[in-house]
Amino acid sequence: MPRATQSTQEQYRRAVATYVKAGGEESVQRVITAVQSLNRKLDQWYARQLADLDLAAGEWGVVTTLAKAGEPLTPSQLADLTSVAPSSMTHRLDKLAERGLVERTPDATNRTRVFVSLTDEGWQLFSLAIRGSDVVESDVLQDLSDAERGELARMLEVVIARLDDVDA
């Protein structure tokens, strides 16, 4: 086994042992520690990918929000959906518009409002990033069968739903 993997695994085992020693239930701590480690490692990879695409994380948030919405949104809607101040959103939109990734279109029924949408170039960048991520994400999950991936997704969705219930 590669030394880096052993080191990572040893760090994982030590973290779980520490939480158990402090009173945590072992199976719970194994799951939470593993999910946190996975999230941290993927975040590191995604940060490198965004740097390669010359995008800040906040700009990527705007691009993904517009792609998922499937329709133009107002800057206020984008600010709300990405949890940023309207002034920060204006700055992000300016940078994305300068690169030709988004366009602002005046609302025909309300002259004070504009809608923001992805341009073709913005959608192409989004698609390129998703295809690049899919390669790494597929590699991460390659040792799981389709059925196991489905079961893992189902179980994580149950956990996420439970967290949503706790937040409510």
Image: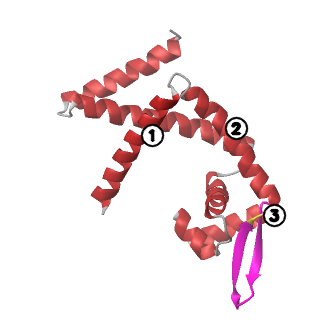
Residue at mark 2: 132
On the image, the x and y values in percent for residue 35 come to: 41, 36
Q: Is residue 60 above or below residue 92?
A: above
Q: 64 or 5: nearer the eye?
A: 64
Label 3 sits on what residue type? Glu
On the image, the x and y values in percent for residue 116 come to: 71, 71
The answer to whether residue 103 is magenta is yes
SS for callout 3: helix
Residue at mark 3: 98
Q: Is residue 142 above or below residue 73?
A: above
On the image, the x and y values in percent for residue 1 come to: 50, 9
Label 1 sits on what residue type? Ala
Judge whether residue 99 can be spotted in this image: no
Label 2 sits on what residue type? Gly
SS for callout 2: helix
The answer to whether residue 79 is magenta is no
Judge whether residue 149 can be spotted in this image: yes
- Closer to the N terminus: mark 1 or mark 3? 3
